[in-house]
């Protein structure tokens, strides 16, 4: 019997090596060491399989199963109630939106809406815009104004740091930041109409609303900035695109 056959028999049943006479007679020193290694490994595997089980394991399993059974119906009912409540809120919100869009008695004054939206927009985006200086040209300004059918008919008279389009409430706007007399001033041109010019003070900022034909120009500056004076300077040079 060769060594390969001996090792095959040892691997298949290491504890029965004594029962086969030819196997015992033909063992070499290397095969004897191989047998000892296999027996040690077999013993380690057997010891690893003997894991002590906690005395209360069965009780824990039964408790967890019963808890899950009790919790499941409650969770489903709670989910159904939550979905029903969400649907009710969505329905009520839909009615309110419908009133805002179509019922004049529910709509807030145009000035308050424009001023609040502009001021909040400035507060939200100033941390991102304040470090910028894009050195915007008058040509770029008129390109951004084009979707609103307006343009400045001469060079913009202030240094412009930032220019882009943005969401403005339920509408869109051109959003521009330029240098005023006391600090940076934000200008919005939006397709939301306004009837008359108006100044406002909100959250430590000064603002002015200038009506355009079917649109509005809103200026927001630091407290003390004469935005009404800036509006008077800009209003004559912003014209509808013919």
Image (cartoon, rainbow, N blue to C red):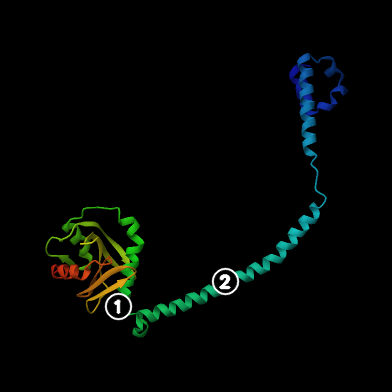
| Residue at x-position 27% and y-position 69% | 206
Q: Please, is residue 163 above or below residue 74 in the view? A: above
Query: Dot 1 lies on which element?
Result: helix
Tag of residue 69: none
26 relative to 204 in the view: left or right: right
Label 1 sits on residue? 110
Tag of residue 82: 2
Give the x, y percent position of residue 126.
Answer: 33, 59
Using the image as rendered, state which of residue 114 and residue 75 is in the foreground: 114
Mark 1 or mark 2, earlier in chain: 2
Asked if one can make out residue 57 in the rendered structure from this viewpoint, the answer is yes
Q: Could you say which quadrant of the image residue 76 lies in?
A: bottom right
Mark 1 or 2: in front is: 1
**Disc 1 to disc 2, C-alpha distance:** 36 Å
Q: Could you say which quadrant of the image residue 120 lies in?
A: bottom left
| Residue at x-position 32% and y-position 75% | 113
115 relative to 18 in the view: left or right: left
Give the x, y percent position of residue 105.
Answer: 36, 85
């Amino acid at each position: 019997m060769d060594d390969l056959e001996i090792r095959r028999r040892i691997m298949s049943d290491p504890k029965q090596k004594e029962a086969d006479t030819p196997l015992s007679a033909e063992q070499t020193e290397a095969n004897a060491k191989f047998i000892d290694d296999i027996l040690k490994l077999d013993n380690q595997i057997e010891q690893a399989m003997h894991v002590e089980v906690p005395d209360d394991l069965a009780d824990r399993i039964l408790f967890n199963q019963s808890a899950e059974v009790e919790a499941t119906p409650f969770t489903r009912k709670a989910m159904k109630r939550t979905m029903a409540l969400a649907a009710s809120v969505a329905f009520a919100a839909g009615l309110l939106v419908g009133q805002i869009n179509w019922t004049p008695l529910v709509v807030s004054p145009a000035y308050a809406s424009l001023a609040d939206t502009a001021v909040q927009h400035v507060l939200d985006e100033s941390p991102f815009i304040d470090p910028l200086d894009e050195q915007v040209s008058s040509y770029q300004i008129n390109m951004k104004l084009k979707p609103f059918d307006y343009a400045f008919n001469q060079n913009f008279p202030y240094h412009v740091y930032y220019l882009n389009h943005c969401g403005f409430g339920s509408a869109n706007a051109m959003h521009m930041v330029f240098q005023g007399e006391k600090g940076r001033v934000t200008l919005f041109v939006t397709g939301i109409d306004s009837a008359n010019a108006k100044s406002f003070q909100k959250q430590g900022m000064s603002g002015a609303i200038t009506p355009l034909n079917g649109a509005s120009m809103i200026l927001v500056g630091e407290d003390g900035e004469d935005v009404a004076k800036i509006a008077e300077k800009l209003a004559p040079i912003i014209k509808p695109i013919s």
